[in-house]
Image (cartoon, rainbow, N blue to C red):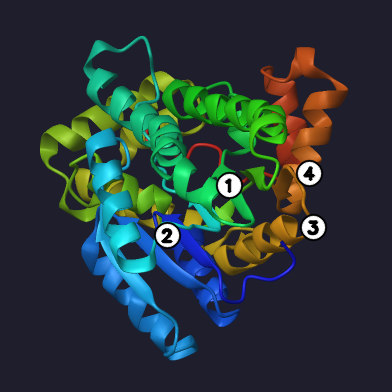
Amino acid sequence: MDSFEGKIAVVTGGGTGMGRELCLQLVKEGCNVATCDVLMENLEETKTLCQKVNPDILVTLHQCDVSSEEAMNHFRDEVIAAHGDKINLLFNNAGIGGGGSFMNPEDRADWERTFNVCWYGVYYGCRAFIESLVNADESHIVNTSSINGFWASLGPNTPHTAYCSAKFAVKGFSEALVTDLRLNAPHVGVSVVMPGHIGTSIAINSGKVLGRPAALDMSEEDIKDIREGMMNSGGEMSEVVMNLSDDQIREFMHQRGIAFRDNAPTSAGEAATIILDGVKAGKWRILVGEDAHRLDERVRTNPESAYEASFIEATRDGGDLVELIGTTEQ
């Protein structure tokens, strides 16, 4: 698929970050877009920006919790009603972070919510739209995994099991689809996207999706949990946090989310361009960001050391993952 002009694309998680940038760049190339999110105010802003880029292109907005198959099927029905039953591009992009520890029973709700959004959002998306993709003359599925789809860690002091498990599932599923589609629907392509640290608001928006207050509005109980988590992590913050007031911790968490978004080596716009160029080139494996390429090489070169402190030290000494490690929700 060397051109998106006149095509129809479905983008999940289009309210911010890479999802929004995918919408903007697709619209710029003359592609009609149906996009969903759980936060409609973000989607409205996306549509306003899209109309400024190309007012003649159809952009439809849909509220959808991608972790629900019923909601995803309702989204599909709305898309077909607005755009027809032939879809050319499906970007399963929606994702959140959270639910880090499998060993903490109190984390189970966040754990399963994170896993369900990041894995079932992809699976249900493919199930819902596969018939419409097959109906088109040419089509392509783009599933967003992560560097955490080949490296299940954010460092030795941060449990990160829900997100990593989901992203490994997305990677394996997408790779398996290469053969499945080649045999049963050869006009449908598939790509798995594995971004490194991208400048998005995932660290800020994940809390909203998980039903948590914004960092600056956290309660004393919220602060107590964060303080205990940091002190038990064994990292450098375990000593620093002892001397911070509750308000200082609120400000620290707020600034950490902003730093994750603003200090990334790859912007959301740059990431979207890499993804779309990869689709045009027919790549089934799309690494996004030089940090993703370097980490992929490090893991492949010495997989036995991938979860040791020395691996993290070498990675950070090389300038990678500086803002990523320790930023995701515990």
Q: Position of residue 243 (x, y in %)?
A: 32, 38
Residue pointed to by mark 4? 293
C-alpha gap between disc 2 and disc 4 = 24 Å
> x and y percent of residue 73 in the render?
29, 42
Label 2, on which residue? 258
In the picture, the disc for residue 281 is: 3
How much space separates mark 1 and mark 4, taking CA atoms?
Answer: 22 Å
11 on left or right of 65: right
* Mark with earlier residue (1, 2): 1
SS at circle 3: loop
Q: Which residue is mark 1?
A: 141
Dot 4: within a 10 Å radius of its alpha carbon, few (fewer than 14), some, or many (20 or more) residues? some
**Of pointers 3 and 2, the one earlier in the residue sequence:** 2
Q: Tell me, yes or no, if residue 251 can be seen here.
A: yes
Q: Residue at x 43, y 45 (%)?
A: 129
Upstream in the sequence, badge 2 or badge 4? 2
Label 1 Cα crowd, 10 Å radius (few <14 / some 14-19 / many 20+): many
Task: Compare residues 5 and 228 and report the one nearer the observer.
Answer: 5
